[in-house]
Amino acid sequence: MTPPLILWFRRDLRLDDLPMLTAALASGQPLIPVFILDPETETLGAAPKWRLGLGLEAFSTRLAEAGSRLILRRGPALAVLEALVAETGATGVLWSRLYDAAAKARDTAVKAALKGQGLRAESFAGHLMHEPWTVQTGQGGFYRVYTPYWRTVRGIPVAAPDPAPARLPAPDHWPASDQISDWRMGAAMRRGAPVVAAHIRVGEAAAMTRLNDFLAGPIDRYASARDLPAEPGTSRLSENLTYGEIGIRRLWHAALAAFEQGHAGAETFLKELVWREFSYHLLHHTPHIATGNWKAEWDAFPWATTGPQLTAWQRGLTGEPFVDAAMRELYVTGTMHNRGRMIVASYLTKHLMTHWKAGLDWFADCLVDWDPAANAMGWQWAAGSGPDAAPYFRIFNPATQVEKFDPNAAYRRRFIAELSRNPGAEARAFFDAAPRSWGLDPTRPYPRPIVDLAEGRARALAAYAARGGAEG
């Protein structure tokens, strides 16, 4: 009886384009796929934890189609893996790398302990195209600005994706598995789950369908349409990419082929994939970006951390239609258009002078496509405390932004019931998804703005000037 290998799955819930799986198949050993609900994973916010649970269900089905199964265990990763090794006689554990501080600390400890027991313990690329330590400046350091990072990365070849195997070699005996239903991954979603469920697309097959649909049309107009929240101008693959339901190399080569075929928006899409890479580059080299100001000089900036204005922002009741539409889109769909993310982040940190960490934490609880690197870098970029090469205090005006990017008010009407005599299903759905404790009523008048935009801008600029900044 050939001893098996354990495949420790995390944010790589796929069989296509998975270096860990390619290496495991090369061993010729039976494979035992495992997912562990460990303390690090338990800390996920309501929406990403719920969405992860759905992803695990879909991946379990995918494995069954390949003659395998997904073993679910709960507990500290090392203890669970050691128990599985003892139960199965496995000779090693393989996994795909993650890059946040908690994951790196956990994985480093697991690798050392397993190797100390004479087991194979090996991590692989798979979540990124380029490992963060492999992309360096001419001086041998790491990049702090996106544009030069892009110029370097675009010239580095990306290995072709490996196809998914038709079958996975199974062990003679399977270890026991928890039931996903017992984990209650969606408990914190409460009544919001059925509302958001209508908008998500779960699993490897759904991700490939999204990619093919994007390549069949929207990619041509991506450079301009991606900024129009009322139009289907984006790929919406961030949801699948964050759980590894599609491989980044698969996306890169598909977009690169589209670029070479002359599709107008393909280069912009490639740049967005590299923006994600850059966020992980920074998360690896400066892990404090996820928890504190990337630029230390912002530590004394007078941001608020609580208060009624933050509450109004969270509930989509600021009186600024672009902001409120985006915040309600988040509660209805579990995602938010990227233009909306920039607007709501700028408004919270600048016009409301509220700490970016409050916004980051809210997104981490509400986004089904939550990503530790992209979320952190996006918020710090918007706040001004992060990696931004622009030498000015960027303040988006929601009123002028909505005139430019939602001129017909289609996006606003789609999600704000109070702006229509006969609101649509998605606008009404916000009141079904929101907690009853909020006491919301769609028949109430739309609120007046909680802050004057000109006054909010002036206050932010004054605070910026006080810390030594200058408006460009």
Image (tube, rainbow, N blue to C red):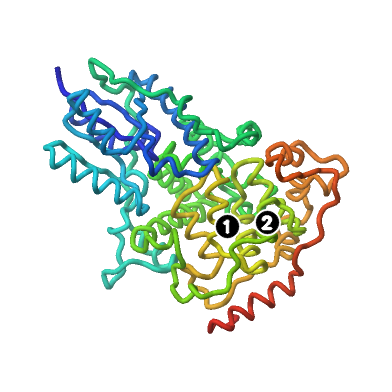
Above-or-below relation of 46 to 35? below
Which three-letter amino acid code belongs to the residue tagged 1? Gly
Kindly indicate the quadrant of the structure image that contains residue 282. Answer: bottom left
| Residue furthest out toward the left | 118
Residue under the point 52% across and 49% down? 364
Query: 10 Å neighbourhood of mark 2: few (<14), some, or many (≥20)?
Result: many
Question: Dot 1: what SS?
Answer: helix
- Horizontal side, residue 367 vs residue 430: left or right: left
Q: Which mark is residue 402?
A: none
- Please tell me which of labels 1 and 2 falls first in the chain: 2
Tell which of 277 and 433 is nearer to you: 433
Above-or-below relation of 158 to 92? below
Q: Position of residue 413 (x, y in %)?
A: 78, 47
Q: Are marks 1 and 2 in contact (CB under 8 Å)?
A: yes
- Horizontal side, residue 219 vs residue 122: left or right: right
| Residue furthest out toward the right | 421
Tell which of 150 and 303 is nearer to you: 303
Which residue is denoted by mark 2 in the rendering?
313
Q: Position of residue 350 (x, y in %)?
A: 63, 69
Above-or-below relation of 85 to 335? above
- Marks 1 and 2 sit apart, C-alpha to C-alpha, by 9 Å
Which residue is denoted by mark 1 in the rendering?
359
